[in-house]
Image (cartoon, helix red, strand yellow):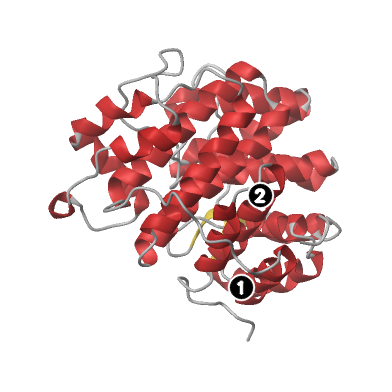
Amino acid sequence: MHAPLYTSLDDALDEIAPYDMALANGNSNHAPMVAEALCALGRPDAVMPWVARYRERMQARPASREKIGDEDWRCALGRRERFADWAVFFAAELADAPWPTVLDRWVGRLAPGFCAAATHGPIRVGHAARGLAERETMSRRRELADALASWAAAWQTLPAGGAADEPGALRPRQAIPRVPVVPTARRLPGNIVAALAALADFPEFGRAVGMIDASGPPAPLVAELTDVFARVYLANARDIPTTIAFIHAVTSHAALGNLLPYVGEETARTALWHAWQAGCGLYACYGGGTAIVETVEPCPKQVAELADQAVAHGDEHVIKFTEACLSRDRIAASPAYRAAADHVAGMVRPRRPG
């Protein structure tokens, strides 16, 4: 993998700024996340061509219509039509305080809704924070405001039977096979957001999610969780729905890893527990058979080859997933990361230029 290089990020974010958090088809707008991921892969040359190809799928962002106040912000959580209002709110927050202060405050407040937009809320915030930490610019501050706005507007909670201050006793690798899986006959058609919402009618899930001991230092536990969910991906990504679901189980935990340097330990621990909860939710809705791959055959491809493979492939999920896997592998090496990054290119249809 080339060294991270962010020379084109601000131009890309300025190009993306007039657009909504959602695409015309209702799915999340991946453009700001992919732009940052390509820079993290050391491929800033690929950013603007990729954004140009993606632009036809984006839709204009609405105008802000109603102010969100310091006292009534909870009423606007989970209301996608309030995205522009949230963006104005967070822009004001960032104008009044250093961005790490705002990030720590709001990651803690938004953490219970970690699965927002199939976890795209925290994923976008993780990309925005990493880009802003590389260099503070007006464009990157605006993107952090928009990223936090997307998390707040898509906020979604899951049923739970445990809490961060009531730790279980298991390690994540021991716990994930014990997460109850929704029987195939009870799975409803629809997207990830709808599947996760249906867990409200699956009480077994809420009782099981508090199994892990999340009381240790956050960074090693995030490393353990990303490795576990890369192995869950390898065991369960068998078609497009399962592939996309378990891509998010990895990239959401990688995003949390990107946030850890800029939030306090209490916030990190709260977010970590809810990230685990969201990962368990994805497994409950899309898992089946073997929970996790214990032994992984080493991938023969080198890091740079995998990065170039993702860029050439062109799909937003493949690019983000590959970058997340390679970045986490650099932090705490595991053969699961390269194997998963290589596997995903064969599971998702390429979006090549032209």
Which mark, residue 279?
none
Disc 2 residue type (three-letter): Asp
Secondary structure type for disc 2 = helix
* Mark 1 crowd level (few <14, some 14–19, many ≥20, 10 Å Cα): many
Can you identify the residue that label 1 sits on? 314
Can you identify the residue that label 2 sits on? 329
Find the residue positioned furthest to the top.
Answer: 165
**Quadrant of the rendered structure where residue 178 is?**
top left
Placement of 165 over or under 329, stated as above or below: above
Which quadrant: the C terminus? bottom right
Whether residue 84 appears in this view of the structure is no
Find the residue positioned furthest to the left.
Answer: 185
The percent position of residue 267, horizontal first and vertical second, equals 59, 21
* Mark 2 crowd level (few <14, some 14–19, many ≥20, 10 Å Cα): some
Secondary structure type for disc 1 = loop
The percent position of residue 29, horizontal first and vertical second, equals 55, 57
Give the foreground label among 2 and 1. 2
Closer-to-camera residue (167/12): 167
**Quadrant of the rendered structure where residue 300 is?**
bottom right
Closer-to-camera residue (32/302): 302
Disc 1 residue type (three-letter): Gly
Residue drawn at the location 59% of the way across and 65% of the way down: 299
- Spatial CA distance of label 2 from label 1 is 21 Å
Residue drawn at the location 56% of the way across and 77% of the way down: 351
The percent position of residue 212, horizontal first and vertical second, equals 41, 25
Name the N-terminal-most of marks 2 and 1.
1
Closer-to-camera residue (39/234): 234
